Image (tube, rainbow, N blue to C red):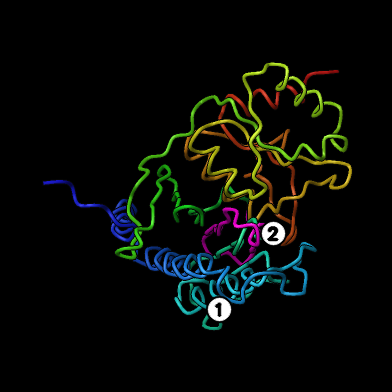
Amino acid sequence: MPDKPVTLTEFIIEEERHFKQATGSFTLLLTQIENAAKIIASHVKKSGLVDILGSAGKTNTSGEQVQKLDVFANELLVSTLLESGQVYAIMSEELDEPVFSKKNRGHYVVCFDPLDGSSNIDSNVSIGTIFSIYHKNPDLFQPGIKQVAAGYILYGSSVMFVYSCGRGVNGFTLDPSIGSFLLSHPKIKIPEKGDTYSINEAYFHLFDQKLQQYITDLKEKKEYKLRYIGSMVADIHRTLLTGGIFLNPANKKSPEGKLRLLFEVNPLSFIVNQAGGSATTGYLDPLIIKPTQLIHRTPIAIGSRQEVKNYILSLQRSL
């Protein structure tokens, strides 16, 4: 008789048993994120059939155009998490400031990007929800090393829920016939090396000389291939499964970097680290940086351990 498929809910419950002080609160919180993800996935699949395509006519805290699906996903996640009773505070890329639970009883702080890569919605490119969970703390701006768990939901040819609570990384694929996420990628391990680099080379002329030299060296080695989707969660997902390196470095237009520490860099760095990879700003581990504001930005390189090491060595090499 074949083994019974393991659902995400079953897996979360089993994982929580490894934590002696667990109360079930964390399981309920992740289950609520799972439920919201299913609703978002349903709307993403129907985005060409209903009036949720296009811009919402405003910009977010990062100065980017907000898409209609951004608004929907953000409002859904905020209401779902607040109603769960498990959160103390919520921080979102689409909000100007943190939102606190009125009851103030929750044990967790949740940070999320409701729809990473949303500028690609109208082009039917894979997008995703990224989330990060911390223990309740009056100081909401905690370094990424304090994360209790992190994950992302990828809305692509299939819908995948990938997460880690510090015990490795596991991936679950939504089976639409039963409406459940099933364990499809147990104990994900990123390859030690890779032959793919992912970067927006349109900014090559804006990069500093060391970074230009690093990219030129990759091209001359010829075994490396460029793969860039422009949706970070999709680029990281590919890198996680097949190896390589994803880079979003500083440039003359964005000297502090472009990606948000709280909403993108911390959760995805945490996941890749848990899968055996590593991340760097070029000079230090992003997970030790204490955010100073909601839209704290940083340069980032994430991927296979050897590729990230090579990148750091390249930057340290004198020209």
* Rendered residue at 34%/53% (across/down): 19
- For the residues labelled 2 and 1, the Cα–Cα distance comes to 30 Å
Residue 268 image label:
none
Residue extending farthest to the bottom is 102
* Rendered residue at 63%/27% (across/down): 225
* Rendered residue at 74%/46% (across/down): 298
- Foreground of the two, 124 or 205: 124
Q: Position of residue 129 (x, y in %)?
A: 55, 59
Within the magenta stretch, is there residue 122?
yes
Residue 119 image label:
2
Can you say whether 260 is above or below 195 in the image? below
Dot 1: few (<14), some (14–19), or many (≥20) neighbours within 10 Å?
some
Can you say whether 219 is above or below 95 in the image? above
Residue extending farthest to the left is 1
Dot 2: few (<14), some (14–19), or many (≥20) neighbours within 10 Å?
many
Q: Which residue is mark 1?
A: 101
Residue extending farthest to the front is 49
**Residue type at numbered disc 2:** Ser
**SS class of the residue under badge 1?**
loop
Q: Position of residue 222 (x, y in %)?
A: 66, 18
Within the magenta stretch, is there residue 91?
no
Q: Nearer the viewer, mark 2 or mark 1?
A: 2
Q: Which residues are magenta?
A: 119-142
